[in-house]
Amino acid sequence: MIEVLGENYYIDLDEIEKYIDMSDKFGDEEDKSEDSSPVSSSEMKINIVKFELVKMLIDVILSEEENYDDNLIKKSKTTSTIPFRLAFNSLLNKKLINHY
């Protein structure tokens, strides 16, 4: 495993699936509508905004590089970039990444 910020973390794919899933929110509306066919159990409705944001945050985390300017390191207490810290903390807050 690779350490991130001194600890081991993993991306919880099941939690991401639950987080972006909207099937249960619209299930009642589908049953009431007689004109449209009901959604089969294999289909999933997702919140596209949440999906794109999670995708972008994971991309920021996975594309983090460790090449830093010495002047920037002196000003910051940590060597990680601001986008990385925001993405990591956002995903950790929503429990989409977890401590191993």
Image: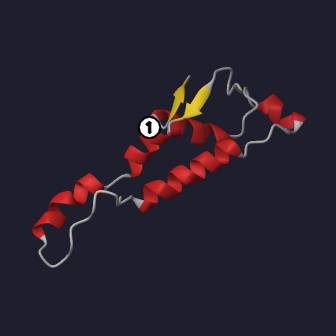
Taking 75 as reference, is 24 above or below it? Answer: below
Q: Quadrant of residue 44?
A: bottom left
Nearest to the observer: residue 2 or residue 84: 2
Taking 10 as reference, is 54 above or below it? Answer: below
Q: Position of residue 50 (x, y in %)?
A: 44, 54
Task: Name the residue furthest right.
Answer: 70
Taking 57 as reference, is 52 above or below it? Answer: below
Q: Quadrant of residue 18?
A: top left
In terms of secondary structure, where does tag 1 sit?
loop
Q: Amino acid at mark 1?
A: Lys
Q: Position of residue 57 (x, y in %)?
A: 58, 48
Q: Position of residue 25 (x, y in %)?
A: 24, 55
> In what quadrant of the picture does the N terminus appear?
top right
Residue at 18% from the left image edge and 66% from the top image edge: 30
Residue position for label 1: 94
Residue at 59% from the left image edge and 37% from the top image edge: 88
Nearest to the observer: residue 93 or residue 16: 16
Asked whether, in this view, residue 84 is left or right of residue 89, the answer is right
Residue at 34% from the left image edge and 58% from the top image edge: 42
